[in-house]
Amino acid sequence: MFKLIKIVACSVSCLILASCANLSPDLDEDFLAKRDKIELNSRALAALLDRFEEAQQTAVQLKNFNGYKLPDLSESLLDRGKTLLGTPYVWGGSSIKTGFDCSGFVGHVYKEELGIKLPRTTRDMLEMDAPVIARSDLEPGDLILFNDQGRGRVSHVGIYMGNGEFIHTSSKRSGGVRVDKLSNTYWNSSYLQAKRVLTETEKKEPLKPAQLLSRIAQ
């Protein structure tokens, strides 16, 4: 509708200018003044319609932005972990440059994304002061600790992702950082304990502006 009005306004201006070419040089000044006024009004209307159209587009963009939900901390944690998929396994490794072992990977993700420093070894993670979570109550972001196929000694750690899956790195042969299912025979029999590092409040807390800008920059 607004585009049609704009086209009409522009057409009027063009018709006026075209008619001027055929007018007599001694045309009275009153007619010329009216012509100029109509032309100015037509241009003003076209400019006003342009600004109205821009305002409409801005309103749509704001509406879409207001509907955007900032990711919570557990989501951002897992997103960070996913960016490392395929990073090689290296015993004792704790950085992208060197590769990761299991606790090095988990510690790196928590520290780089949330600024939380975890114990370096799986044994210390098992003993750290954090709530123990029942397997049936697992939530994304929880640490899952495994033993050596039921032998009682903690030997591995990963981060629960939801839907029965966890992200971890286990060996060179497995391809480094990867996602596996807890229902897998080996991991199911090796499951030892889960711990919750993030509180319920923290897990639902939106990213701080600095964290969000950091993710956008990456």
Image: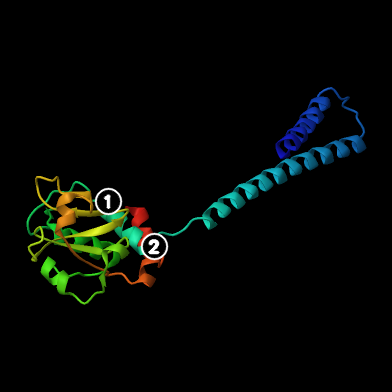
Q: Position of residue 35 (x, y in %)?
A: 85, 36
Q: Is residue 174 left or right of residue 111?
A: left
Residue that label 1 marks = 82
Q: Position of residue 142 (x, y in %)?
A: 27, 64
User: Mark 1 and mark 2: span between their CA atoms?
Assistant: 16 Å
Residue at the image position 33 percent from the left and 62 percent from the top: 74
Kind of residue at disc 1: Lys
Q: Earlier in the sequence, mark 1 or mark 2?
A: 2
Residue 82 against residue 107 in the figure, above or below? above
Kind of residue at disc 2: Asp
Q: Secondary structure at mark 1?
A: helix
Quarter that holds the N terminus: top right
Residue 198 against residue 4 in the figure, above or below? below
Residue at the image position 87 percent from the left and 25 percent from the top: 23
As drawn, the residue found furthest toward the bottom would be 129
Residue 214 against residue 127 in the figure, above or below? above
Marker count (numbered): 2
State the mark number for residue 72: 2
- Asked if residue 95 shows in the view, the reply is no
Q: Nearer the viewer, residue 183 or 144?
A: 183
Q: Position of residue 108 (x, y in %)?
A: 20, 61
Q: Is residue 35 left or right of residue 125?
A: right
The image quarter in which residue 11 lies: top right
Q: Secondary structure at mark 2?
A: loop
State the mark number for residue 67: none
Q: Residues within 10 Å of mark 2 (few under 14, many from 20)?
A: some
Q: Nearer the viewer, residue 177 or 135?
A: 135
